[in-house]
Structure formats: structure tokens, C-alpha cells
Image (cartoon, grey):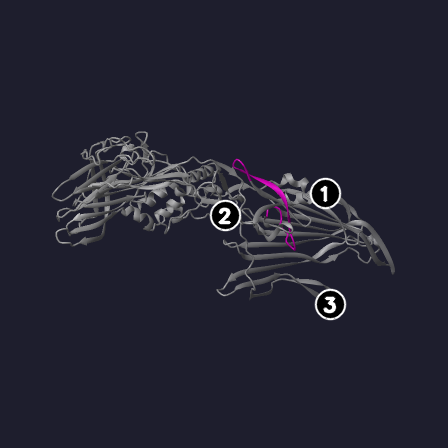
Amino acid sequence: MPLIYTRRSAPRTALVHRAQASSLQVTSLVHYARGGWAGRAALVHVAQAGTGAVVQLTHVALARISPAAAPGSTPSPTPHAPVQVIYGAQPLTVRAETNVGDALSVSYSDDGSGPTATVTLPGTVPPTGDQLHLRVTTLGSGGKVGVAPGLRDYEIRTVYTAQTLDLDDQYEVNDTPGAGSVTVRGYSLAATRLGSVRLRELVSFAAKPTPRAPSSAPCSSRPRPQRQPVSAVVAEAVKAAGLTLTFGQYVDPLAGEEWTEWRTPYSTRNKSPQQVLQDTYLAIGWHAIIRRAGGSTLLFVLPPDGMAGTLDLSGHEVQAGGSRRRETAQLPATVTVKGADVLVDLPELGGLIQLSPDPTAFEREVRPDLQWYTNAPTPDGKGEVITSYNKVAGRVTGTYTVTAQPVTVQEQVNGQLKITPFDKVLTTEESTQSTYHPTCQDMLLSQETRKRSWGYTSSTKTTSTTVGRYGYLGAWPAGDPLGDEIERVTQTWSPDGSLRHKLLYSRKLISTRQVNPEGDLKDRGPLQPFEYVERLRLESYFFDGLNWIMQWRESGGQPIPVYDADSLDAIRLSVRGGTVTSGFTPMDAAPTSVTCPDPCVKRQRVVPNVVRLAVQGGREGSDVERTVTWTDDRRKLTQYGQWVAQDLARRETASRTLLTVPDLPVGTLVTPKDSSGPRGLVQASGFEIRGGGGTSSVTLRVAEPVSTQSVSYVPDDPVRRDIVLFRQVGGVTVDAFSGEWNGSTPVFQRKFVRVAGQQNPKPLDELEWIDDPRYGPTATGNYGQETL
């Protein structure tokens, strides 16, 4: 190993080192040189050679050069000798061993997603087995090289590094005679499976959903929705890849969080464990690191800047050089976190009655239980039609109507026309009573309509009669009571909500009678109902496989006149019973059907739950959006957003090369052992070993604190959906979500929305609208209420 030094007349000097290995037993040559100049005065040169037969050759040389004289200055009267060689201490020995023998060379790297290594072994026979155990030993002593001022000490510690990798089945053999070798690859099988395994359904309610109870089932006896802890699902998912979930010294940030059936659903079917991580812990700004510990492979989930172990490093263990850079482009201007929708109660309309354009009509519309009546004139303007209503549980179940108006009777009495006027007397009374299914307010079970009427003749004497119902009560003069007619509808429904049978019954007056109808007025009796006709119609509906069919049958009385056999004059009407008609016919459409709301479910309003944080110093115009599905807690969403921002913080990243090969897994917090020692969180590490020498590299990250502030969130979708409060001329007033929050409570404000055409949204409908640049808030035409 000759050392040749050449001195030139120029101020610069050149040091040339030539080394040649002539033996086949020399397998590698490691050369390390460090130059430290005090005015271009000193050069330190270290050379190492490791062979199969000669274990180690160490050469430490210091070349000391006289400082160059500045132009115009006087040279030093006693210049230093051109070359001064000082033999120093043995600096370093690195040995790599595996479970199949010593390694000729090793190249190892780890960025947290799973370590990989390329190992060259002597011989041409590939190793067998599933695992590769690698042990690296670094031996040496510290000291100081040279006598020039300002030289740094170097420090070498005895270090043992052990790694266990899965052995890849691929290899490469070098068949050079006398120097054969085989190169194999080690990796983390679990890290690979993290993205390749396809999961079965791990969420219990997605694998076996809870059956929905029928709406007729009592609320107290219904099954409750299933819940699934988020952490348990993630742990099971990574276990399928061969990993064990751990949080090191930190507390699980999703402890106690659950997915709830029907409220916050989730599914793992056909997803990879990596996707499940992306949906959960990685979505909130935490990060994952894979490490091998004994016979297990651990998946550390750590917070931003979280560590998994520490190591002190001295500046004397770091080789000269390396790079540092500041990274800022990844920090966004805003972070948006979308959580589960917030459910709030519908607005209370009772407090808005006096704000509506027509308070009386609005009250009748929105009060669930109310009775009232109206008074309207008859078409000729001389009489009154009084109608009263009974509203129960939001539905009108009864109506009552009476009509009072002037009546004039013209009648021939003793050959003369007699006109008898009656001033505003009762003529008709009609009432309807409806019965609905107790748990399905849209399912009409029965409805009965009763009609009464009063007759008037020249001999009628009126009496005061009290009538009224549902908040109305009045007394009117009335004539001779005639019939009490009835119409009744009874309906039977199938379990799926379609009409199966309809029974219609009616009883109508067809004739009256009077005592002494031909006598003097004072001798005539009052009119009385005489003959009625009852009719029964049964309709049945069924599907024959092609069409809906209606089958019907009518029975009951049928009026038939009775004639005198001699004079053939009609004497009276006779009522005949029995079936009148029957048949069946295909229907143009399916029979009436209803969708019954669930009485155990309360309708609520859905409010998009989004937290947006402004990040101080973030890149203008950029936004990072994350979605979580298990919580609607805005405080937690804010914490998640802060973690995401910190994970993307501005940082300084430094790459350094070390003299030794220490155990530096990703996630280790490196702290300085002295004033010149490195600091930061290990982001990536690796080492190279060849011929008895080796170096390791490490990338360290130091993140800056991030400051965030909550700001209003304005959705990008121009379509809004809000609840209608009341109608107005030309539109409606809606309870519009302002985008602001008072803690965890959304803030609403009343807003007028134009409604065009025949649209007629009613209070508590959900109305879709846009902010039209020409007309302002305008309905799109979509509105209604969801069926629960």
C-alpha cells in the first residue's frame, strides 16, 4: 500500500493514495478520508483493508502542510516539514453475522414501513429457511487524530445491532472461481401483507345485521343496535397481516370510540389492513411504524412527533458532511375534518305562530291536537255553513258540518197556492269520524259518515234544536226530522302496507210518510222517515302473478215499486234483498299502499358536521381533508385536525452518516450527548457493511410547533337543504343552517326562499334550494319528508 505525496509550487497541495490488492484472498478495501484544514494546513487520511486471511490492516496518516503565504506577505522563516506521518489508534471494526454464516456485505434500510436488507454470503449455495437473523457488532476505541489545531475527537462505542427478517425466495449467485457468493434479500412479510391481505367482515353488525322490528312491535321489546369498538376492529385487521397493534408509551386515541349500527356504519369487507388504518388512526394524524420484537412483529401507532425509544448520540460519532433541509410545502393553509352528522330536533313551530303571515291558519296547521270551527255563507249568501274540526296527533280525525238557511215552502191547500217562509232553519247536519291504526297514522281502518236532514211543509212547526261538536255548539230552529243516513268504510291491510279488503256499507232514506197528508194543515202530522235502502259492497285485491285483480260483490236492498193489480197505479216501493251484482276485473295500478312511520323513531334534522382549522403559515390555497365516521363530537374533531396539522408541520430534516452501526429504528428520539451531537426523530435509517468496515446513515426530523384556529366552514356544494317553517307569498321561510356553531350546537337563522310554480312545501318539509345570483335563494323543486 504505497503512499505518494507530491508538493507543487502552487499554494494548493495534492495527496495521492494508491492501494492495490494482488491476492485473491483480499475481498474488500474500505477507504475513509477526512480532511480538516486550518488554512489548508492539515489532512487526515484513514485507510482500512480487510481480507479473508489477513483480519485487518489499519493505516492512519496525518499530512501536515505549511500554510500558504498570502500574496505580498513574507513566508514563514521555519516552514513545517513537507509531510509528517503519525500512526494512531485502530478506529473501527464492523462484523456482520447471520444464522447461515458471516456476511461479506450487508445493505440495510428502514423507513418505518418495514425493514429490507440485501446480504451477500460466501459460497454458492442459497440459504434455506424462512427467516434471516442478522447481528452486527461494532468494535473500536476513541481518540484524536493528528496535532493540527481544531481537530475533532472521534468516538466509537461497542454496539450490537440485531435484526430478524423474513427470507425472500429470490437470490442471485456469483459463480466466480475462488470467490463465489450468493446474495439474498430479507424483508418484513407482515409489512407486505399489510397492504395485500383482503379482510373478511370484522364489524359484527355488518356481518350479521340486527333485524328490523316491525312498526307494530312495542318500543321496549325491540332489539338495540349493535356497537363495535374501533380499536378492536383495527387490532383484528392488522393481526390478519401478522402484526400486533401497540401504542408504546401513549394512550390509544380511539379508546372508547365505537361504530354504531344504523347511526355510524362501517365495513371491512374486501379492504386491506392498510385501508382500515387509513380510515382510522392515520386519518387523525397518527402514523404507523413496523418493528420486530422477538418472535412478534409490532405495529406502533404513534402521535405526531411521538417516539418509540431514545438514544443519545455524540457529535464525535458523526462523520463530517451530511445535509440539512427545511420542508414547508406539506403544511396546508387549512385542515378540514368531517365527522358523523349531527342530529338535532326539528324546530318548534308553536313559537312561530305570531311570526307567520296568517297566524290563525298556521296554528291550525302546526298544532298536533286542536279543535276549531269556521263559519262560511251559503252560495246565495243568505245562509250559514258551520264546519268544525277535531285534530288528534297531527291528523284530522273528525269533521262536523251544519247548514242553516231560509226555506220557502209552496204547497196547494184547498186548491190554493200557499207560501210558507222559514227564516234560517236547520236543513242538514253531517259528521265524519275516522279511525287510524294506532301505530300507523296513514293507515285508515274505518270511517263513518252520518247525515241528518230536516223537512219542511206548510204545516211544519219548528222547534229549537241544539247541534254542534268539536268546539262548536249552537241552537237553531228545525223542522221535521227525516232520515239518519249512514255511510261506513272498513278497510283491512296486509302486513306489507297494501290494501287487501274494503267494505262499504250505506243506509239511505228512500221514502217518507205523514199522518192525514190530505187533511187540513192543522190536522196533518209531521213528516217521518219511512223506507231505507241498505247496500253492502265488498272489494278484495290480490295479485295473480301478472296483474292486480279487484273482486267485488254487492248485496242489500233494492227499491222496487209495487203496483195495484187492477188500476196498475204505483202503490209503494218494496225493498228486495240479496246479491245485486258481482265480478272481478284487472286493475290499472296496484291498490292503495302506505309506508308506516316507525312510532319508536323520532324524526330529526341532519346537520353536516365539519370542523375547519386555519393553520398559521400554511401554504396558501391548500387544504387537507380527512373523514372520520365514528363520532360527532366536535371537540374530538378539533383535536384530530390539530394532530393532522402537526403531522404535516414545517420541519428540518437532517441526513447524517455515523462512524458506528448503532441500533436506530425508525421512531427513535435521538438526543445530543454533547454540544455538537445530532437531535431529532429518526425518520429513516440504514447501514452498509463490507470487508470489516461499515457506516450507517440516519435521517432525523425536527418538527416545528403548529398553531391552528377554528374558522367557519362553507361547503363547496351550492345546494342547501333546510327545514320549512311557514309559507309566505311567493315562497317559504326556512330554518337555514348558518354554518356556525355554538359549542356543539348548530346555529340556524330564518331565510326567505323563492318557490315557483305549483310547488307547495309545507311546514317541516326539507326543502332543497340554491343561492341564485339573479334571484337570491330559490327552491330547486325537491322537497318532502323522509319516511322513518
What amino acid is at disc 3? Asp
Residue 220 picture location, percent across and down? 47, 41
Residue 718 picture location, percent across and down? 56, 49
Query: Which residue in the structure is indicated by mark 2?
Result: 215
Please state which of the two labelled residues, at mark 2 or mark 3, is closer to the viewer: 2
Magenta stretch holds residue 762: yes
Q: Nearer the viewer, residue 108 or 518?
A: 108
Residue 98 picture location, percent across and down? 18, 43
Q: Is residue 446 left or right of residue 359?
A: left
Residue 96 shows in this picture: no
Distance CA(mark 3)–CA(mark 1):
49 Å
Q: Is residue 465 left or right of residue 14?
A: right
The tag on residue 473 is 1
Q: How many marks?
A: 3
First along the sequence among labels 1 and 2: 2
Distance CA(mark 1)–CA(mark 2):
39 Å
First along the sequence among labels 2 and 3: 2
Q: Nearer the viewer, residue 224 or 288?
A: 288
Q: Nearer the viewer, residue 56 or 43?
A: 43
State the image quarter where residue 133 is shown: top left
Asked if disc 1 and disc 2 are in contact, CB closer than 8 Å, the reply is no
Residue 228 shows in this picture: yes
First along the sequence among labels 3 and 1: 1
Residue 320 picture location, percent across and down? 29, 37
What amino acid is at disc 2? Ser
What amino acid is at disc 1? Leu
Please state which of the two labelled residues, at mark 1 or mark 2, is closer to the viewer: 2
State the image quarter where residue 287 is shown: top left
Query: Which residue in the structure is indicated by mark 3?
Result: 564
Are there few (<14), some (14-19), or many (20+) residues within 10 Å of tag 3? few
The tag on residue 481 is none
